Image (cartoon, rainbow, N blue to C red):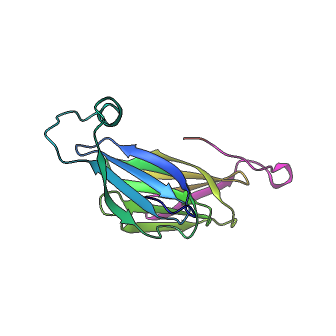
Amino acid sequence: MYNRDIWLSSVIISHEDTWAVYIGDSTGSIDVYRKAKDNSTNNNIINYILEYNKQIYKHSTWKNIHQYTITKMLIVEDEEILITVSNDCTCRISDSKIGTCLYTISNRNSVRYTGITYLSNDKQVLLIDELGSLEIFSLIKEEIVNYMNIIEPNDRQRVSIYS
């Protein structure tokens, strides 16, 4: 059961062979839930939980992935990574199986990232922040490879993209 001082802030489902539900919270931690051990062959997570009234169990807790609330998550199953952004103005790219942080990207404007997406052909993570700046992180080069202001500084308002 969750402490009342902690709130759940984001959720994403992995649809790999053994599916998982990742739930981010206000402490910057992630709980990973998996299918309970049974003889069911139903691999559709929603049907499994709702229609069949089956249980899922907490597989693991990844403490302090971020310093503050995790606001968005994106799973990239082909790369086995989980990409998260937080109110701590960082993006973390973690191993989706064990939670080990592979990369930390700090926002150059010291503001929150509000959107994330992944370009699989280029192996690049696109990040947009609340000031309208776009950063492109390359998994191949392991660094930011491009940065641009989508909105000019004089025209800036808080913005967000949804992925």
Relative to the observer, which residue lies in front, 105 or 8? Answer: 8
Q: Judge whether residue 122 can be spotted in this image.
A: no
State the extent of the magenta-drawn residues as a range: 137-161
Q: Height in image: 108 above or below 20?
A: below
Task: Locate residue 101, reporting x and y percent.
Answer: 40, 68
Q: Residue at x 18, y 48 (%)?
A: 37
Judge from the rendering whether residue 144 lies leftward or rightward of residue 107; answer left or right: left
Instruction: Please name the residue shown 28% across and 39% down the image.
Output: 54
How far across and down, in percent of the image, does residue 107 sit?
62, 65
Q: Quadrant of the C terminus?
A: top right
Measured along the vertical axis of the image, is residue 22 above or below residue 38?
Answer: below
Using residue 41 as the reference point, say whether residue 50 is left or right of it.
right
For this rendering, which residue is in front, 66 or 155?
A: 66
Q: Position of residue 8 (x, y in %)?
A: 53, 54
Q: Quadrant of residue 71?
A: bottom right
Magenta span contains residue 151 = yes
Whether residue 128 is visible to the viewer of this picture, yes or no, is yes
